[in-house]
Amino acid sequence: AQRVTQPEKLLSVFKGAPVELKCNYSYSGSPELFWYVQYSRQRLQLLLRHISRESIKGFTADLNKGETSFHLKKPFAQEEDSAMYYCALSGPRGTYKYIFGTGTRLKVLA
Amino acid sequence: NAGVTQTPKFQVLKTGQSMTLQCAQDMNHNSMYWYRQDPGMGLRLIYYSASEGTTDKGEVPNGYNVSRLNKREFSLRLESAAPSQTSVYFCASTPGGVVYEQYFGPGTRLTVT
């Protein structure tokens, strides 16, 4: 069964420290993976997706098929990064379904 | 473009009451979705509509019905609200196909007492 696991409910780091938000997935085939972010009192928005391989707001994520992971990383956390982060998996193709993880709340402390 | 809009923003219902949550998108997207967001549970798919004229159940469809009124609008109905349906409901849309990102509405916060 397809599944997305985000093992940390809450991650607290100090400003300037590196950040890694973990995401593991279970999927047979080639997955399409996304990270969404929800800032306080705002709607969910796409942060990045593995297919585009771009860096947004200093965040990057690499798909590791061997470890079935898609961890989100940033070398130096900023206070404005404090938000809820969701890892999501789409597919299989033709189903139009997306599966979200349970989310990780990131708190960046001054 | 307004993107994805939802009404109402907040609602309080009594157990057994019914209501419809409205969602509309102006991006000419084919696919639309309804999720509920609960603490510790993430986003769970209630129903989705791959294209106009089709609807399918998601992970947690019990207690809900949907209508894809036209390409723009996708409504979610609670026929007999229960306290377990207290949640934040999000509507989303995509151009169609799972390679695309989802565009989310602002959410509806529903409390059932």
Image (spheres, rainbow, N blue to C red):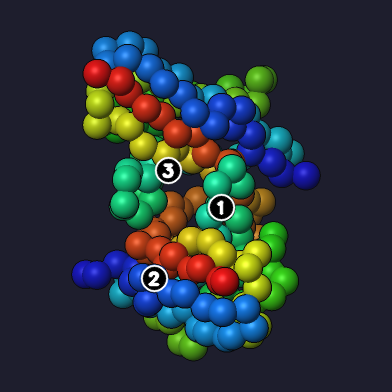
> Please, what secondary structure does the residue beneath circle 3 have?
strand
Circles 1 and 3 on the same subunit: no
Where is residue B25 drawn, in percent x and y? 36, 73
Contact between labelled residues 2 and 1, with CB atoms less than 8 Å apart: no
Where is residue A4 drawn, in percent x and y? 64, 38
Please name the amino acid that badge 1 sits on: Asp
Query: Which quadrant: the N terminus of chain A?
Result: top right
> Please, what secondary structure does the residue beneath circle 1 have?
strand
Residues under labels 1 and 2: Cα distance?
15 Å
- Which numbered disc, 1 or 2, marks the residue that appears first in the sequence? 2
* Residue at mark 2: B10
Task: Kindly report which numbered mark, 1 or 3, lies closer to the viewer in this rendering.
Answer: 1
Chain of residue at mark 1? B
Q: Looking at this view, is A4 or A78 the one in front?
A: A78
Chain of residue at mark 2? B
* Residue at mark 3: A36
- Residue B38 disc label: 1
Task: Kindly report which numbered mark, 3 or 2, lies closer to the viewer in this rendering.
Answer: 2
